Amino acid sequence: MAKHVTFWKMKVQPGKAGEIQKIMSSAQDQERIKAAGWQLTVVGTRKDNPDEIWGMVTWDTSARYYKNAESPDQDKDYQQMRALLTADPEWFDCDVVEESRA
């Protein structure tokens, strides 16, 4: 079970949600973060506002999540995404207390 989860909300410039998705789904980056402890990402757009993106990521430990968050590779991805946003994202870091799946 994952030990760390971060929930987030981003307000994207109109029509830029697809560009954000491309940055997030880079196969090269997914391999890099998988090796660093990443386990799962879920991303969605609000039904009443497709320019507002919500998501969550789970990591095996908070320490490995923060190490990745502070890495130059992650900062590069963040800066590319931030250029497409109308404001800084909102982040909510949490400890996982329960995880269930079908």
Image (spheres, rainbow, N blue to C red):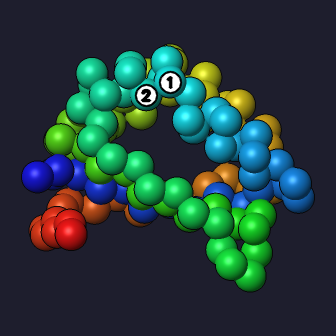
What residue would you read off at disc 1? 27
Q: Which mark is residue 51?
A: none
Find numbered disc 2 in the image and state the secondary structure of the residue it sits on. helix
Say left or right for 47 vs 96.
right
The image quarter in which residue 66 lies: top left
Residue 72: x, y in percent?
Answer: 50, 17
Outermost residue, right direction? Answer: 14
Q: Residue 30 carries which label?
A: 2
Proximity of marks 2 and 1: CB atoms separated by less than 8 Å: yes
Residue 63: x, y in percent?
Answer: 21, 36
Q: Is residue 77 above or below residue 72?
A: below
The one nearer the camera, 69 or 25, is 25
Which residue is painted at 82% across and 49% down in the image? 16
Which residue is painted at 64% across and 33% down in the image? 23
| Residue 54 makes an appearance in the image | yes
Say left or right for 43 vs 3.
right
Which residue is painted at 70% across and 66% down in the image? 52
| Residue 82 makes an appearance in the image | no
Residue 64: x, y in percent?
Answer: 24, 32
How dense is the environment of label 1, judged by Cα within 10 Å: few (below 14), some, or many (20 and up)? Answer: few
* Amino acid type for the residue under numbered disc 2: Gln
Q: Is residue 71 above or below residue 66?
A: above
